[in-house]
Image (cartoon, rainbow, N blue to C red):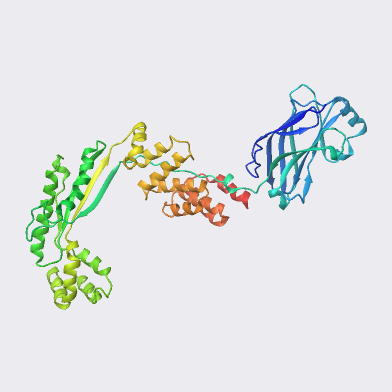
Amino acid sequence: MKKTFIITILLAVSAILSAQQQQAPITLTGVDAKLSVRNIDVARIADKTVLRMEFIFDSLDVPSNRYRAFTPVIRSSDGQNEQRLKTLIVSGRRQEIVFEREGIDPLYADNCDNLRRYNGTFQTYGYYDELDSQPWHSSANIYLECDLCGCGDLLKNKEAFLTSLKPTDPYDLIALTDVVPAPAKKERNLHGSAYITFVVDKWEVKPDYMNNRRELRKITDTLDVMVKDPNVSVRQVKIHGYASPESPYEHNKMLATNRAKSLTDYVRQQYKLPANVFAPAEATPENWEGLRKAVVNMSEQTLPHRSEILSIIDDKSLDPDPKEWRIKLRYPDEYRYLLREVYPGLRRSDYDISFNFSDFTLEQAKEIYKTKPYQLSLRELWDVAHTFEPGSDDYNRAMQQAVNIYPDAPEALVNLANIAIRQKDLLKAESLLERAGDSGEAQNARAVVAIIQKRYADAERLLNSAAQKGLDVSKNREAIKILK
């Protein structure tokens, strides 16, 4: 009576030339027998293709006077090429005696192993065979040809698919190393400019004069948020005033200094912050640097004597007042244009606000991450990321967030580049690594990109650099040997 023959393939992938896992059992009909095969390992060693696997006979019954023969076959994907490997013969008690007396079936005798089956016992067999590698092996399939009648009639054999071979994938061989950020103080600085309009020759801050209300809010809106947030402490507020280069210089110096002090006092009065938070006001009497930058960015069509005006601005032998008068007298049209279009923007008040974020426990950081991730340090973001499964969407988003908040941090750039490499986005990885510094981890990541792109000389040079910085790069060096 015909019953079911089941081959269950439990896959163990080789680190060199890997096989794909068979997801479901393969069922053959014809005999009363069961067989399992596991730990399939296909490797290319030197010029040989090697097959290892483990047969499990625990449920296989072989009649005393019969045998079962199992032959792995490598066949090209187009079916045009085929090679048979060594046959495993599993014999019953009497059949083994026949083989000893009369010899093994000529069909298999040239290349086979003979194993006696002890029915009802746990029994395994470690299979090994090798043959000369062929180019078509890289995309071939491996089947298990099963002679279930023990008669040597190939037409009656059953065939079970075992695995597909694929070319060595460098992603199976490479090793990437992330950088663990060191704990750091979360000191931040915010810089901006406000264009406060003062009454001519006056320095009192008038909030309702011209556009002052809007300009003052650039400073106060920022401080409002900070003083209300318990996780923020303001360290210092510094204001630097600039006046435009209109003579006389000494008069401008007095105005710029007093206006910067007045604005500092105005801001101080809005908040109950310690007096030492507000740094002494600073001032630049005439903003020649700003004027020069504006002229450099103009065309000759806009400012016909642009080059000559730049020469006067750069003339270190001239004091500020003679310098301005020379421009005014020699190029009156251009001076009027500058006075109208450029000088108003030179009269500004720069503000610098330095502040700290609190240090958080991991549980606090996880909550802060949901709404205000910018308050976390690079190390805190790392710790939050590792509360998620590495490689998961949440983990990857946290690592991306680290780069968003700290775009110049080499540690964050290397770690995100490693994620991009694992996702096979080499373009993104290379872009990130351009700014990632020369740490061992960064050099290793660059080497991995080179390995994947088959630039082995570059990869070896980069691995040498990484090794000199104390990183273990042995796995990637081995990957190069295998791939080459």
In this rendering, position of residue 431 left or right of residue 281: right
Q: Where does the image place residue 216, in percent across and percent down from the top left?
A: 17, 50
Residue nearest the observer in this picture, 409 or 64: 64
Residue at 52% across, 55% down: 461
Q: Is residue 55 visible?
A: no
Residue nearest the observer in this picture, 174 or 463: 174
Pick out the residue farthest to the bottom: 330
Residue at 15% across, 41% down: 271
Q: Where does the image place residue 23, in percent across and percent down from the top left?
A: 65, 36
- Is 306 above or below relative to 269? below
Q: Where does the image place residue 135, in percent across and percent down from the top left?
A: 71, 53
Residue at 35% across, 35% down: 365
In this rendering, position of residue 335 left or right of residue 70: left
Residue at 12% across, 58% down: 256
Q: Where does the image place residue 99, in percent across and percent down from the top left?
A: 89, 31
Pick out the residue farthest to the left: 201
Pick out the residue farthest to the front: 1
Residue nearest the observer in this picture, 222 or 107: 222
